[in-house]
Amino acid sequence: MKIKNLLSVVFAVAISACTFAQSNLLNSKTPDEIGKKTPAQLISDNDKPLAYGYVHDRDVLMGKTIWEFIDIDERINFPLYYPIDTAFVGKERRALFDVLVKNIKNGKITEVYGDDYFNTKKTFKDMASSFTYIDTTDTGKDEINNYYDEYKSGKKVLDPQYINKKELDASYISGYKIKGYWYFDKRQGELKYRLIALCPVTPEARDAGNDNADVIDLFWVYFPAVRDILHESKAFNDKNSAMPITFDHLLNSRRFNGEIYKEENVYGDREIQQYMKDNSQNQLLESERVKEKIRSFESDMWNY
């Protein structure tokens, strides 16, 4: 009897997830009806991100802030990168970068900062030069020089073909930096992780497409403030397209691979590459050492 009840619950959850993912897909008569929920579905829909439990400072026996880099060239991290060409996919499928930028533009995401310590707040207007680059081509400069007086007086207007415009989009993303906090909850008796901030790493728009371009930390988003938005956006699930994964779930459950590049330390939180210079192998080994040090704390708690 218990098994039967358990299967019923699992089936109900699967159906509700399916309905939320592609509501009305099998019943719609026109493409416009896809994704529109029935009144009954809207009433019963209470899908929200899983709330974080309250953790008292006295319950944190050990804590360590860690910074990681997520390389989107790794296959496991592809759900954070694709799709980069939105002309051939539905409106419900967007890359994480597009979700963040769109909601910063429309004002839904306001907790945007210029650094990972949240010292300087930024708006999209402050970052506009990083997203869009407009310049005159060499041919256009020659055109202006040949007819300088006419362009200066306004009698002639430069043709758009002489203007080079670059827009930064998801295809130029190199990866993401994340800031998180590992802590041992003595009340629960286990090691836990809490994601604090997220940052796209890209070249600036003027260098977009250049393989040798330097990359920058575009902006830092305070993660707990954007969970509702990331929960509404879905990453592709290649095992079952009827049950896509929300970006909030994907990041909170750490369904990605990241390399530690910094831990909080007495030297002003210096990065690993600052004291392990010109040796990539040693940097990876140091990253693993930091990871193992955190893991060992939990196992050491149970050794008497």
Image (cartoon, rainbow, N blue to C red):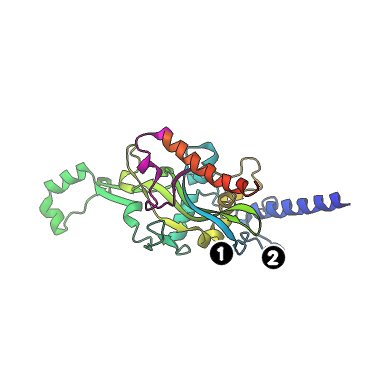
Q: Position of residue 298 (x, y in %)?
A: 60, 48
Please tell me whether residue 269 belongs to the stretch shown in magenta: yes
Mark 1–mark 2 contact, CB under 8 Å?
no
- Left or right of 230 in this view: 43: right
Q: Nearer the viewer, residue 165 or 270?
A: 270
| Residue 255 visible in this rendered orientation of the protein | no
Please state which amino acid type lies under the numbered disc 2: Pro
Compared to residue 288, the image places residue 121 above or below, namely: below
Give the extent of the magenta segment. 259-281
Q: Position of residue 29 (x, y in %)?
A: 67, 53
Label of residue 76 in the image: none
- Left or right of 206 in this view: 21: right
What residue is disc 2 on? 39
Residue drawn at (35%, 40%) of the image = 209
Please state which amino acid type lies under the numbered disc 1: Asp
Q: Quadrant of residue 207?
A: top left
Residue drawn at (45%, 47%) of the image = 176
Compared to residue 90, the image places residue 43 above or below, namely: below
